[in-house]
Image (spheres, rainbow, N blue to C red):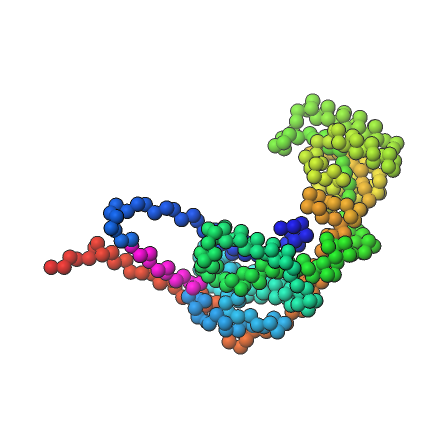
Amino acid sequence: MNKKLSALLALVVIFACLTACAGIPAPQETPEPEPSASPSATPEPEPEKEPDRYDLAFAQYEPDEIVMTINGSEVAWEEYFYWIYSIAYQIQQMSDVDWSADLDGQFTYQSFAQNYAETMLTQYLTVAQKADELSLEISADEQAEIDAIYAEDVVNYGGGDEAVFDEYLAEHHITRTMYDKMNSVSVNYLNIFEHYFGVMGTGLPDEDALSYAQDSGYMHAKHILLRTVDDGGSPLSEAEIEAKRARAEELLDQLKGLAGGELEEKFDELMTENSEDGGLATAPNGYYFLAGEMVQPFEESVLSLGDGEMSPELVESDFGYHIILRLPLEIDEEMDYRGYTLRYLSAYALFENMSTEWFDSAEVEYTEKFAGLDFNTLFGTAVPTPEQTPEASAAPEN
């Protein structure tokens, strides 16, 4: 999957993610059968799978019965059930619950599960509706990426057999139509984002990107770090720590009196040669961060500096001695190994706000039949327990 598509994962609900969230175990490899002792032996037929509470719950309504509409789009029972099943499966893994019981003073178990299902349905249906509204179609290349996800899932969950994979989907109450729809959500979401903000947010004006980054509190700084702890976090010896401090003071002295481009050039030279920061390779242009993401002494030092200013004294933290140079925010500089920029993060944050408004304003209406659905009734049917009457224990006939 390309970088564009992987960059917008907030709303991705592809099947691999869904099964992990629902706690559904990956299928285990089927062992080879042992050879029969007799060539003429007839294999015993496999017993039918005993219906569990979720099979019984699903069977209470017809798959195509309409549960609700979201902005006018109908949601059938089979689609709605998958989402309540996925959260109920998690809630009931350890033990049964009283679905009407209070959860945290605001929700019952049932209302929590219903809100979850409603939220997920609203999100991916609204995304599809918005893509249709904007006449945004999935391209051939994007469809190829979706097909690749399907092929990978067939291997991972069906052993490479499409029929086995379809059975696996059915066992977990998800239809192939639902599976395809959910796999298209990330593509639709990305296309809508690019419609408003361009590829990787490049359509967001400079002033808007910079303003958002500044208002959000982003900071940018690089440092030379001489560590006073080992890789396990244990302090070095006093002699080693003193030697590190002396070396850090020497480096600081070499930088004092410099300014502007000359300071940054010399700083980079000394940082490359001396810094013991393990993240230097992935952040050669320094770190972009928000309040609370760095150790307190580092953050406080950066906040006290203006753009292009260096810490006048060594900054000591639990990691060691720092010499810090604060840098201006560069909206198109790659911030990390993912290739994200402040322009992209600003555009994405603005898009999240926009899409959240769509989700929050969605019109959700339950049909009369399902408005009063009771989860205790739905999931309360006990799993049938077969009688244990082994034939070996039966009395022999005379």
Count of numbered marks:
0
> Which residue is the extreme one toward the bottom?
368
> Which residue is the extreme one toward the top?
239
Dividing the picture into quadrants, the one containing residue 244 is top right
Q: In percent of the image, x 68 and y 52: which residue is there?
A: 4
The answer to whether residue 301 is magenta is no
- For residue 58, above or below residue 319: below
**In the picture provided, is 107 more to the left or to the right than 157?**
right
Q: Which residues are magenta?
A: 44-55
Q: In percent of the image, x 21 and y 54: which residue is there?
A: 392
* 340, 309: nearer the viewer: 340
Q: Position of residue 227 (x, y in %)?
A: 70, 30
Q: In percent of the image, x 51 and y 62: which residue is there?
A: 176
The answer to whether residue 46 is magenta is yes
Q: Position of residue 220 (x, y in %)?
A: 77, 43
Q: Is residue 13 visible?
A: no
Q: In percent of the image, x 66 and y 67: which residue is there?
A: 132
Q: Position of residue 334 (x, y in %)?
A: 74, 45
Q: Position of residue 7 (x, y in %)?
A: 67, 52
Q: Is residue 155 visible?
A: yes
* 353, 306: nearer the viewer: 353
Instruction: Report the quarter where the C terminus lies.
Output: bottom left
- For residue 373, above or below residue 338: below
Q: Main secondary structure of the magenta part?
A: loop
> Which residue is the extreme one toward the left?
398
* 53, 234: nearer the viewer: 53
* 119, 268: nearer the viewer: 268
**In the picture provided, is 225 more to the left or to the right than 37?**
right
**In the picture provided, is 32 more to the left or to the right than 297?**
left
